[in-house]
């Protein structure tokens, strides 16, 4: 029995909250705290009567550590599940340290203002030292390791699907299938169709920044960076069919490279249709993906935030989206002196997700692992002092929970490999 505070009430949070309410044995009390309290109240009204989990709501500005501290001290949760935006990771971690509660999130820290000179100096040094230019990286949150260790608290980073489940798949492959893993290809396929000419499946600002940035992969101990969308492959996905996919930078590559140094190459591919890419290129060319503020009619506006206001709310895509996602990892390596390859993946159906929790599969595949990560921490199965990613614990209870809570996975031997 435990009390969990969930920060944020968007697409991913909504699924995680539904799942916590299905799992009242573990989460008997939850607080939904977010910037717009009316969204929290609406969700509470929808769920009350369907669950024995006691739900409270609150308004909070998660950029403000003092406000967070006051709210946490008042509610006294065992853990905080951060499902706001990556911009709030550090303030929420600070508040958890000050109040002595565990911390869980699904995406690593990203600066909201990438023009801030103090942030930029650190960023540019890191780009040179490590060789990838993504705006997000683990260094900011790994810098909290000692503080969490000293406080005897757990911070579990990145327990969505990717990152999150993909790294659990890697730990599972290592534990049960390989003596040595040589390559990991993470394949994220969305075969869903929402019927709009252009929309993003999760927060547009985070999503568009991610896919318009240069791609990179890790090979023989080094990062290799490539122009955005310049490595393309085709793959025939179970449940979806043949799709084009492109190599992207992705945060779990950084953690897996650090924690599994024996792996020679780690890549991440995501599927995109030609129409999505053409829209995105056009938006980028006209400046609508810019993240710095510009002056417009006497007001400061950030173009990508303005674009977010124009695009369909990802939460509204649920009823319209049909088709399936297929996300997983292909591993190659050695077992008992012989070469081996396996593919561990989950197939998730958009409409099935909508029937169950009124969300499409992208939010579902992130929200379910967010609940599972929180459960691993509060139940003590994944509780140890420090800051960790999901590949650093025993994968077995998490893998069992995926089967139980709606994301069953399969292991395929000798899959088609990506060249
Ligand atoms: P949404 O934009 O739908 O939701 C974000 C929520 O956070 C909103 O409710 C928003 O409030 C709230 N919020 C934003 N800023 C603040 C603040 N300062 N104080 C309090 N609340 C705030 O995003 P998603 O649900 O799509 O994504 C949530 C997280 O999940 C993100 O970090 C994203 O990167 C991550 N993610 C991870 C994936 C993975 O597989 N690991 C995949 C997809 C997403 P308001 O309602 O007022 O806007």
Image (spheres, rainbow, N blue to C red):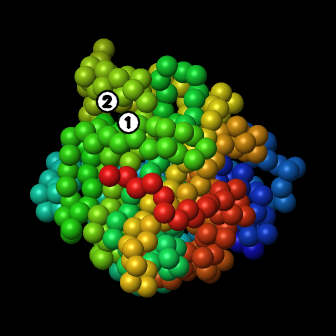
Examine the rendering and report whether any part of residue 124 can be seen.
yes
Instruction: State yes or no: discs 1 and 2 in contact (Cβ < 8 Å).
Output: yes
Task: Report which quarter residue 37 is drawn in.
Answer: top right
Q: Position of residue 320 (x, y in %)?
A: 65, 27
Q: Position of residue 85 (x, y in %)?
A: 46, 48
Disc with the residue nearer the chain's start (1 vs 2): 1
Q: Which mark is residue 82?
A: none
Q: Position of residue 77 (x, y in %)?
A: 63, 68
Task: Report which quarter residue 253 is drawn in.
Answer: bottom left
Residue at x 61%, y 61% (from the top left corner):
410
Kindly state the secondary structure of the residue where label 1 is placed.
helix
Residue in front for this viewpoint, 78 or 339: 339
Residue at x 61%, y 69% (from the top left corner):
399
Q: Which mark is residue 208?
A: 1
Residue in front for this viewpoint, 43 or 199: 199
Task: Report which quarter residue 407 is drawn in.
Answer: bottom right
Answer with left or right where residue 154 lies relative to residue 408: left
Residue in front for this viewpoint, 153 or 99: 153
Answer yes or no: disc 1 within 8 Å of ligand 1.
Answer: no
Crowding at label 1, few (<14), some or many (≥20) Cα neighbours within 10 Å? some
Q: Which mark is residue 289?
A: 2
Residue at x 21%, y 40% (from the top left corner):
227
Q: Position of residue 390 (x, y in %)?
A: 48, 69
Answer with left or right where residue 142 lies relative to residue 53: left
Residue at x 69%, y 30% (from the top left corner):
319
Kindly state the secondary structure of the residue where label 2 is placed.
loop
Q: Residue furthest right?
A: 49
Q: Quadrant of the N terminus?
A: bottom right
Crowding at label 2, few (<14), some or many (≥20) Cα neighbours within 10 Å? many
Q: Is residue 412 above or below residue 116?
A: below
Examine the rendering and report whether any part of residue 113 can be seen.
no
Answer with left or right where residue 36 lies relative to residue 213: right
């Amino acid at each position: 029995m435990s009390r969990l505070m969930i920060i944020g009430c968007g697409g991913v949070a909504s699924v995680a909250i539904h799942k916590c309410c299905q799992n009242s044995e573990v989460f008997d009390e939850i607080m939904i705290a977010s910037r717009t309290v009316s969204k929290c109240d609406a969700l509470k009204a929808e769920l009350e009567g369907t669950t024995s989990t006691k739900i409270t709501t609150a308004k909070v500005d998660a950029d403000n550590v003092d406000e967070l501290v006051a709210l946490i001290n008042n509610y006294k949760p065992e853990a905080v599940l951060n499902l706001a935006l990556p911009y709030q990771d550090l303030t929420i971690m600070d508040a958890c340290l000050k109040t002595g509660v565990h911390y869980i999130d699904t995406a690593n820290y990203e600066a909201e203002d990438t023009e801030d000179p103090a942030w930029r100096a650190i960023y540019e040094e890191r780009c040179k030292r490590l060789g990838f230019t993504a705006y997000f990286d683990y260094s900011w949150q790994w810098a909290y390791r000692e503080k969490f260790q000293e406080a005897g608290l757990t911070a579990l980073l990145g327990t969505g699907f990717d990152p999150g489940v993909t790294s659990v798949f890697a730990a599972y492959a290592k534990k049960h299938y390989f003596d040595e893993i040589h390559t990991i290809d993470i394949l994220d396929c969305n075969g869903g169709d929402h019927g709009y000419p252009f929309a993003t499946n999760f927060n547009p600002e985070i999503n568009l920044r991610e896919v318009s940035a240069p791609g990179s992969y890790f090979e023989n101990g080094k990062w290799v960076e490539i122009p955005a969308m310049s490595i393309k492959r085709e793959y025939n996905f179970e449940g979806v069919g043949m799709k084009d996919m492109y190599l992207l930078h992705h945060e779990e590559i950084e953690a897996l490279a650090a924690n599994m140094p024996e792996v020679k190459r780690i890549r991440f591919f995501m599927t995109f249709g030609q129409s999505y890419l053409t829209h995105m290129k056009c938006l980028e060319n006209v400046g609508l993906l810019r993240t710095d503020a510009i002056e417009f009619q006497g007001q400061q506006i950030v173009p990508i935030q303005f674009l977010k206001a124009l695009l369909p709310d990802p939460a509204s895509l649920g009823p319209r989206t049909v088709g399936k996602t297929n996300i997983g990892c292909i591993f190659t390596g050695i077992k008992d002196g012989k070469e081996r390859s396996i593919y561990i993946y989950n197939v998730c159906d958009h409409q099935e997700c909508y029937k169950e929790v009124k969300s499409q599969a992208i939010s579902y595949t992130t929200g379910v692992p967010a609940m599972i990560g929180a459960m691993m921490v509060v139940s003590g199965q994944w509780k140890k002092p420090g800051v960790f990613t999901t590949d650093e614990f025993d994968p077995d209870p998490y893998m069992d929970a995926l089967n139980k809570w709606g994301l069953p996975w399969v292991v395929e031997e000798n899959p088609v490999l990506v060249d």
